[in-house]
Image (tube, rainbow, N blue to C red):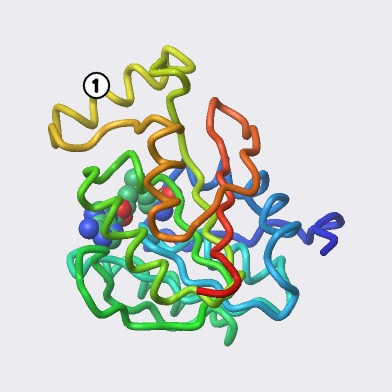
Amino acid sequence: MPTSNLPAEPVLSEELPVAEACLRNRRPILDVLGRYVPEDGFVLEVGSGTGQHGAYMTEHLPGVRWRPTEVRSRLADVRLWHQHTNNPRFLAPLELDVTQDIWPSRDADVVFSANVVHYISWREVECMFRGVQRILKPGGLLILYGPYNYDGQFTSEGNVELDKWLRERNPDSGIKDFEQVMLSARKYDLFLQADEEMPANNRTLVFKKADMV
Ligand SMILES: C[S@@+](CC[C@H](N)C(=O)[O-])C[C@H]1O[C@@H](n2cnc3c(N)ncnc32)[C@H](O)[C@@H]1O
C-alpha cells in the first residue's frame, strides 16, 4: 500500500499526551506496516501507550481498522487521542492486560505492539504470545517493534542505558534476546517471517500464525 505523498502533519492540541519517541518512529513503522497489513485489515494493538500510533496509522493506511488497547491505568490517554482523532477506523480503546485469559477482541488480521516486549517480564511476554495465538486469524501476523539483543549482546550504548533504566524500574523487565523471543513465539504457533532493521537500533519482528491451527 503506498504511503508516500503524506499530507501535512496535523497540529497537536496542548492537552493531548505526546510520546516524543512515537513522533520519531511512526513514519518508519508506517512504512513497514504498509507492506504487511492487508488493505482492509483489522489491527489489534497491545500496550498502545498514548494511542498516537493508531491515530497516525489509520490516517495513512486507508481501509485499515485499528483497535488500541491498554491496561486500565493507562486507558485515559488513549481515550483522549481517540476523541481527538475522530476517525471511525480508529476504534474506541479497550482494556487489555496481556496476562488476562479472555482478550476483548478476536479474529485480528494483525496484532501490533510497539515498545512493549522490553517493558514487560518474560512471563508477560509468554502470556502475550498465548493471547495472540488465540485471537489472531489463521495466517495472521504478529508485528513487534522495539529493541532486541542478538547473540546475548546489546546493539548500542543507548540500548544498554535503556535496559538499565528498565531494570531499575522493574527487575523483571529489560531488553530481550531475539533468539529467545523467536523460540518462545514458536511454542504458540507464531513463526518468524521477517526481522526488519529500523532507525535508532530498533527492529520490527514479523511473525505469522500457522494457517491450520
Ligand atoms: C514503553 S510503553 C510503549 C507505549 C506505546 N506502544 C509506544 O510505543 O509509545 C509500554 C506500554 O506497555 C503497557 N503495558 C505494561 N504492562 C502491560 C501488560 N501487562 N499488558 C498490556 N500492556 C502493558 C504500558 O502500560 C505502556 O503503555
Mark 1, residues whose alpha carbon is within 10 Å: few (<14), some, or many (≥20)? some
Residue under label 1: 164
Please tell me which residue lies in front, 189 or 103.
189
Q: Up-down: is 157 above or below 128?
A: above
Q: Quadrant of ligand 1?
A: bottom left
The disc labelled 1 sits on which kind of residue?
Lys
Where is 170 relative to 66, above or below?
Answer: above
Q: Position of residue 209 (x, y in %)?
A: 54, 64
Residue 143, image x, y percentages = 54, 55
Does residue 18 appear in this view? no
Q: Residue at x 39, y 61 (%)?
A: 48
Instruction: Name the side, left or right, on which 113 lies relative to 172.
Output: right
User: Quarter of the image containing the N terminus?
Assistant: bottom right
Outermost residue, front side: 212
Q: Residue 99 appears at what percent x and percent y?
A: 20, 64
Within the image, what quadrant is residue 62 found in? Answer: bottom right
Q: Nearer the viewer, residue 7 or 68?
A: 68
Q: Residue at x 23, y 31 (%)?
A: 166
State the residue at coordinates (29%, 25%).
163
- Pinpoint residue 17: horizontal percent, then vertical percent: 37, 57
Q: How many marks?
A: 1
Left or right: where does residue 44 sit relative to residue 39? left
- Secondary structure of the residue carrying tag 1 is helix
Q: Is residue 24 visible?
A: yes
Mark 1 and ligand 1: say if the CB distance to the nearest ligand atom is below 8 Å: no
Q: Residue furthest top?
A: 157
- Residue positioned 47% across, 22% down in the render: 150
Identify the image quadrant of residue 2. Answer: bottom right
